[in-house]
Each structure stands twice: as C-alpha cells, then as structure tokens.
Image (tube, coloured by chain):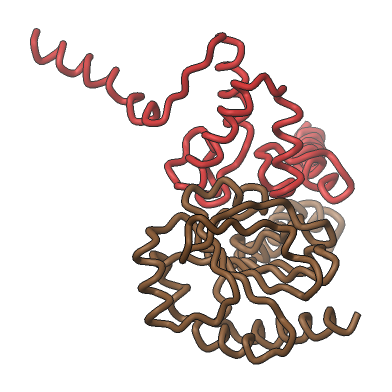
Chain colours: A red, B brown
Amino acid sequence: MNKILFFIFLFFLSPCFSLEDAFQFDTPEKEKTYIEITEELRCLVCQNESLLESQAGFAKDLRKQIALEVAQGENKEKIISSLKRVYGDYILYKPLLKKNTYFLWAFPFLILFVGLCVLLMILRRSK
Amino acid sequence: MTKKEICLYFPLILFFLLGIFLSFGLFKDLRQIPSELIDKPAPHFLLPSLFDERKKISSNRLKGKVTFIHVWASWCRTCQQEKNVLWQVKQIQNLKMIAWNYKDQPLEAKQFLERQGNPYDEVLWDEKGVDAIKWGIYAVPQTFVVDKHGVVRYGYQGSLNKYGIEKEIQLIIKRLQNE
C-alpha cells in the first residue's frame, strides 16, 4: 500500500519543477492571462518550447517581464504585440495568416485534397 | 509512361518534391532571426557603467556619431574568440564603441576585459537583462550598428569571428559615416 501511495505522490510531484518562478496575481483572470500569453509565445533559445515551459534564462526574464505587465493590468493583445514588435513574428508559436505564410497554412489542405483525389481514383478503378 | 503509371507514381513524386523542399530547412541557421529593430529608432536604455555603478549611460548618447554596440558576457564562450575582430573595428576613425555586458558578474566581466583588452568607449552593465528585452536580445554575442541619428541600421546574432562578418560590419559603418 505504501509503495502505491509513494508512486501516486511521485506522480503529483512532477509539475513542481515548473513552479520555480511562479508568480502571484491578485485575480485568477490575471493568472489565466499570464499562462495564455506564455503558452502562445516561443522561447527563442529553446525554439521548440513555449515560454511557459522553457527553463532558459531568456524565458525566465521574459516571463518575469510579462508577469509584471499582467499584474499592472496590461491586456494580452498589447503585451503580445509589443513583444512581436521587438522579436518579430517568430516569437509567436502560431504563425500569422499573411502573405508569406499562405503556403504554410494551405499546404496541409492541399495534400489532403490530393490524397483524397488519389483515393477516389483508386476506389473508382477497383469498382 | 502511360497516364495510369503517372497517376500511380504521382504520390511518390509529390513525396520526393516535398522532401527536397523541406531539406532546405536543414541548412538554414535557425539561430539567425533577423532583428526587427532595423530602420527603427534605437529603443531606450538607462544602464550603469561597469566601471562606475553611479554613472548611468542612456540611449540618448547614441546620437551624433555612428555607434557599434556589442552585447557580450564573460560566461559566453564564443565571446572569447572575438577579440581580433573587435580590435579591427576599433581601428575605424570617428566611431563610438559601446559594450553591453549582459547578465554577468561585474568582477568577472572586468577580468574578461583585462584579459582581452578593452576597445570600448563605454561598457554598460545590464545585470538583469531587462533593458535587453527592449532590444530583442535573447542570446550573446549580439551586435548592432546605430547611425548618427540614433536609428538602428544593422543587427547580427552570433559570433563576429565568422568569415565575412568583419568586412560586412566595416563596410556598413563606413557607409553610415558617409551618409
């Protein structure tokens, strides 16, 4: 029984590492905003991690800055756009829909379309 | 090749074309994110001097002369190999050279400059990296060139000790000085 309990507690321990620099907000909405922003932004040092997950020094600094601005009551769009102005679109995890990303967004649907056409052709022939 | 065969091989051909297209990404330097500050007024900073904490240096000082700004830290290995390039830049007349010491221990930063020599006119000490965020700095070394009017005209992320970079920077500085 003790062993089982030990493993259950061990399981709940895992999220603790990310609380290293947890910030206190006076309202749950602000905390939600903070998490949303840091989840949507990319850490430029560990490029496949969001700001929220990354343990890089850069991510920590930026999290601190974002937490400060959220605590002061800045809204999400303003914080993201000010960071975008300095770090560029690359800081956004979800690429914007604009001229140079049309292909990026359309490509999966294009492949799906081609795949479906091929499938239809094969099915028709097998009949 | 009959029509039927073309149809049969079409997905395979598409797959290969996609493979070729995506393979270009393998040779792209993902660390090289172009600076968004180019052609924009230099963002504000107010930082103490590394050698005298009471002396504050502000971004207002960037006007009047072309300024070369180099962001570095003593803990950065790459920064230790840039000595020669920095001294080459120092040879350019009528240029202001500013070092931006990023998230470093003052003692170690000073020792670093003693070892490598100090080609800079001013050395900023950015202990927490807060002002660095305004400049889009996320890693060291990083280099900027600001023109006489305080507008950022060049940004480069990575070691200066790379073929071609030294020439490129010298050319840009000279061009801006003649503007």
Q: Identify the residue at horizontal 63%, vertical 22% (top origin).
A: A72
On screen, residue B112 versus residue B123, left or right, reads: left
| Residue B172 visible in the picture | yes
**Foreground: B164 or A27?**
A27
**Foreground: A126 or B148?**
B148
On screen, residue A52 versus residue A20, left or right, reads: right
Query: Which corner quadrant holds the N terminus of chain A?
Result: top left
| Residue A122 visible in the picture | no
- Kindly indicate the quadrant of the structure image that contains residue B149: bottom right
Q: Identify the residue at horizontal 53%, vertical 35% (top origin).
A: A63
Question: Residue A47, relative to residue A113: is it above or below?
Answer: below
For this orientation, the residue located farthest to the left is A2
On screen, residue B50 versus residue A94, left or right, reads: left
Query: Which corner quadrant holds the C terminus of chain A?
Result: top right
Q: How many marks?
A: 0
On screen, residue A85 versus residue B112, left or right, reads: right
Task: Tell me residue B170's x, y (percent).
Answer: 72, 86
Task: Tell me residue A120's x, y (percent).
Answer: 80, 34
Q: Identify the residue at horizontal 82%, vertical 41% (top origin).
A: A106
- Kindly indicate the quadrant of the structure image that contains residue B169: bottom right
Question: Residue A97, relative to residue A15: is it above or below?
Answer: below
Q: Identify the residue at horizontal 39%, vertical 74% (top origin).
A: B112
Question: Residue A106, relative to residue B20: is it above or below?
Answer: above
Task: Tell me residue B133's x, y (percent).
Answer: 62, 48
**Foreground: A38 or B116?**
B116
- Kindly indicate the quadrant of the structure image that contains residue B19: bottom right
